[in-house]
Image: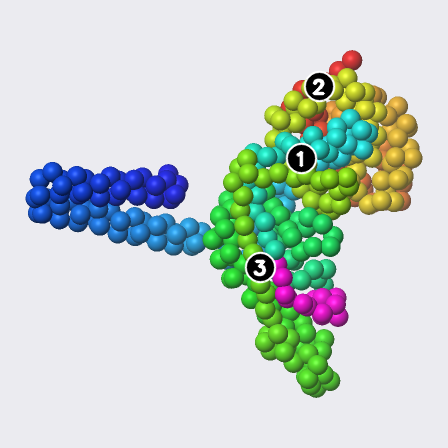
Amino acid sequence: MDIRNYVKILCLVSVFSLSLILIVAYFTGNLLISIIIGSLADSIQIATYIIWILRKEVSLEKVPQRVEEIHHFITYEKKESEAKERLISKLINEGVVREEELYSLIRNKEIILAFPYGEGLRSSIKSTVGYKRQPLANLLEKLRFVRVTRVQNLMVAFTDNLPKNLRNIENLNYFIKKQLPEDWKLISEKIKQRFPASQYPKKFEKWRTGEKFSVMYILAKSLAHEFLIDFINKETFTDEFKKHIWKSIDRRELRKVIKRKRHKVKEIISKISVDFLLSNVPRRIRDKIVENEEKLKDTLGIKIFTDYRLIDKEELTQVLTEIIPRVNKEDLERFSSTIIQESQSCYDLLNELGISLEP
């Protein structure tokens, strides 16, 4: 049972007990009974506090100490959601589904908003340590937070896209306070190497010592059904924010939208190119494969892009060898695996959305 439920139950019992004190004291005038009931209520209040503290300590102990501990979770989830993201983007670009329709499908989601402010890492320092953003924003980005607009620091993440032990505001805050100083230390070490005191005695001293590092931030968590996205006249959300939404849409809800426009969706999807399956393949290789797509389809008997899932990897690799002969076999096998796996993912997703591409 969630700690909040424990607290609610115990508080209700406490209120009930205190009510009994008043009733008993009023009708009987018996002070001893009133004291006993009062002591019981006090004990319950103390127990409530102790349980809350203990649960909080246990919860915080389970919070990962470093970003690396959650990297596997995030990488796996990201890979799993890529097919859905690309499919929804395709339907939007083709005008089948309006963005406003999709925004309404996430109102049952919990979301965490983060607003980091005041770090002020210089551009020269950021480029030195390889950061595109300020340290806290960089850390939040690793946790799959995304910026909402290009001109503000506001970042968001749907709670079910985060590791379970970071979906609680206190746990997330605890993690930030543990990890961010570690990141600052690494930055300081790099600054010492790039801007040593012997050459820059004063200019970077506060960064080298860590004295310059500071940050303010706000974390807020919405309740389910208490979150919405909308705009008037023109929206300027970042692409990463919109993709974050596409990944988070419940597939049952998306299926309802798709069902109303099944024929149009089927028509568009039946024309999807092999390029749809090559998002993780280098551009020069991808262009060459797309350029020779008809040869690929004729040789392998491909009718629609989800048919690639049925092709033997060695057979596909052999055809790719003829199309891009100067690439080593190991890379070609990896490209073949990508095509087959992505084709299977798309096939599974389309089935889940009630879209059959069978003639």
Q: Mark 1 highlights which residue?
A: 103
Q: Nearer the viewer, residue 176 or 223?
A: 223
Labels 2 and 1 touching (C-beta < 8 A): no
Inspect the image, locate mark 1, and give the three-letter code of the amino acid beneath it: Tyr
Local packing at callout 3 (Cα closer than 10 Å; few below 14, some 14-19, many 20+) is few
Instruction: Count neighbours of disc 1 (C-alpha within 10 A) and say few if under 14, some if 14 to 19, many if 20 or more.
Output: some
Of residues 70 and 338, the one nearer the viewer is: 70
- Estimate the spatial distance between the alpha carbons at disc 3 and disc 2, rounded to whole Å: 43 Å
Query: Within the image, what quadrant is residue 81 found in?
Result: top right
Residue shown at 50% from the left, 51% from the top: 169
Describe residue 169's horizontal placement relative to residue 329 as left or right. left
| Residue visible at 64% across and 69% down in the picture | 187
Tag 3 residue: 217
Q: Secondary structure at mark 1?
A: helix
Residue at mark 2? 260
Question: Residue 148, how many percent across, how many down?
Answer: 68, 48
Instruction: Name the amino acid, label 3.
Output: Tyr
Of the numbered discs 3 and 2, the one sitting upstream in the chain is 3
Three-letter residue code for mark 2: Arg
In the displayed structure, would residue 132 be above or below residue 85? below
Q: Considering only order in the chain, which callout, 1 or 3, is on the residue closer to the N terminus?
A: 1
Range of magenta residues: 116-129
